[in-house]
């Protein structure tokens, strides 16, 4: 369940144009995402218009609207043409007391009424327990049983402030599923850098839905990243979702531009440095057999392998680079050139471009 268009756009300072929201939805559908949380219909205006457009373009994915447990919210979702709704309310005492200023009983009443209304209109319903990770377990189990009886199709377990660790996540999701027979979705945040790890821990405990965003966009430190979760499931656990992963880099670049958020070179899975080697030992190994320093093929996510020549390069990488241009570089010449190359790299504070390497070669050897 990708929520780039809802939680992703709630990243401070991010706004998608309507055409960008539609384009991102098409990309997500092409990748193979099963459900797209397209936004918050009750906001009206451009938001409602964009969600309506997404519902009309004939995507294979289910389209979900996000709602408070308020009938008018769900009516706005119905007007857009979505086939699924997320109905969200806080379940932790700190939220109930200080944000909602209400009671646990009132929280339950609102959710039951909203879920029953949505089910009466034929919608798939995700009952969202906001701040579930800080919710007292007995009440969370009571909440889960109640929304299931009201007709909810799944529980969204929200680690709203990202305070879980994978071990705690596993135990809590396991406890919920041992007590209530319901589908569970993991919705994790990355405040402590564990969003993807917590998502996987939830899956291991039995959760069968995961909420993600492209490049991990989302409130504060962001959500679990789509590309990280999909590739981790595939390569670490052998769970291939048959997604079109070869366009991950293209989609990441588009979302990065549309959101005005940097796509770091060091970003896991889709960062340009994922398959870039400079260190002599690493480059030598990658040239002999890419599997020595790469967990999967770069083509799987739309990237290419690169050998860059810099301060830490060795003769194997340098000879390979010159071989690309039909120049056979002897071990002696490579050793001599590396001294000069390393000096330049230190003064420039970066690797050298191919053209710069050629200038050094010409100046050094007069060829």
Image (cartoon, helix red, strand yellow):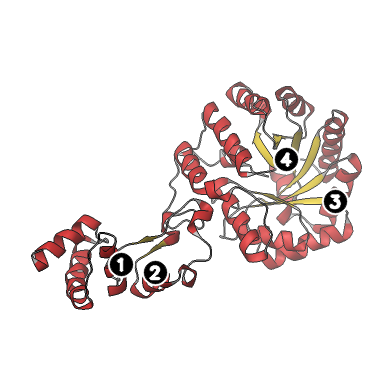
Numbered label attached to residue 100? 4
In the image, residue 134 above or below residue 294:
above
Relative placement, left or right, of 365 versus 299 is: left
Which numbered disc, 4 or 2, marks the residue that appears first in the sequence? Answer: 4
Numbered label attached to residue 320? 1
Relative placement, left or right, of 228 versus 167 is: left
Numbered label attached to residue 287? 2
Which numbered disc, 3 or 2, marks the residue that appears first in the sequence? Answer: 3
Label 2–label 1 contact, CB within 8 A: yes
**Residue found 25% across the figure and 61% down from its top:** 326
In the image, residue 334 above or below residue 3:
below
Foreground: 218 or 319? 319
Determine whether the residue tagged by mark 2 lies in a helix, strand or loop.
helix
Which numbered disc, 1 or 4, marks the residue that appears first in the sequence? Answer: 4
Quadrant assignment for the C terminus: bottom left
Foreground: 16 or 300? 300
- Spatial CA distance of label 4 from label 2 is 59 Å
**Residue position for label 3:** 182
Rendering coords of residue 211 (x, y %):
67, 48
Rendering coords of residue 260 (x, y %):
44, 39
| Crowd band around label 2 with a 10 angstrom C-alpha radius: few (<14), some (14–19), many (20+) | some
Rendering coords of residue 276 (x, y %):
39, 61
Question: Closer to the camera: disc 4 or disc 3?
Answer: 3
- Spatial CA distance of label 3 from label 2 is 49 Å
């Amino acid at each position: 369940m990708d929520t780039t268009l809802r939680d992703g756009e709630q990243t401070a300072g991010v706004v998608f144009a309507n055409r960008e929201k539609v384009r991102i939805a098409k990309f997500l559908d092409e990748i193979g995402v099963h459900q797209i949380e397209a936004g918050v219909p009750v906001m009206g205006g451009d938001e409602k218009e964009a969600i309506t457009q997404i519902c009309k373009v004939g995507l294979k994915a289910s389209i979900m609207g996000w709602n408070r447990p308020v009938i008018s919210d769900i009516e706005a979702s119905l007007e857009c043409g979505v086939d699924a709704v997320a109905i969200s309310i806080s379940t932790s005492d700190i939220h109930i007391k200080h944000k909602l200023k209400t009671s646990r009983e009132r929280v339950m009443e609102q959710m039951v009424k909203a879920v029953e209304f949505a089910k009466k209109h034929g919608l798939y319903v995700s009952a969202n327990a906001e701040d579930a990770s800080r919710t007292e377990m007995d009440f969370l189990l009571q909440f889960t049983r109640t929304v299931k009886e009201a007709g909810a199709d799944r529980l969204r377990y929200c680690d709203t402030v990202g305070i879980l660790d994978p071990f705690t996540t596993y135990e809590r999701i396991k406890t919920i599923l041992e007590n209530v027979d319901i589908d569970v979705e993991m919705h994790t945040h990355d405040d402590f850098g564990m969003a993807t790890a917590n998502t996987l821990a939830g899956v291991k405990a039995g959760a069968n839905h995961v909420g993600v965003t492209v490049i991990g966009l989302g409130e504060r430190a962001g959500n679990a990243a789509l590309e990280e979760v999909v590739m981790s499931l595939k390569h670490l656990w052998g769970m291939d979702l048959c997604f079109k992963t070869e366009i991950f880099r293209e989609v990441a670049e588009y979302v990065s531009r549309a959101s005005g958020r940097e796509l770091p070179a060091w970003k896991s899975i889709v960062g340009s440095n994922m398959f870039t080697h400079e260190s002599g030992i690493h480059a030598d190994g990658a040239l002999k057999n890419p599997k020595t320093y790469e967990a999967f093929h770069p083509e799987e996510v739309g990237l290419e392998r690169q050998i860059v020549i810099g301060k830490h390069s060795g003769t194997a990488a340098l000879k390979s680079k010159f071989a690309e241009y039909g120049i056979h570089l002897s071990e002696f010449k490579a050793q001599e050139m590396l001294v000069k190359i390393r000096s330049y790299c230190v003064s420039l504070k970066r690797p050298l471009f191919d053209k710069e390497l050629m200038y050094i070669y010409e100046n050094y050897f007069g060829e």
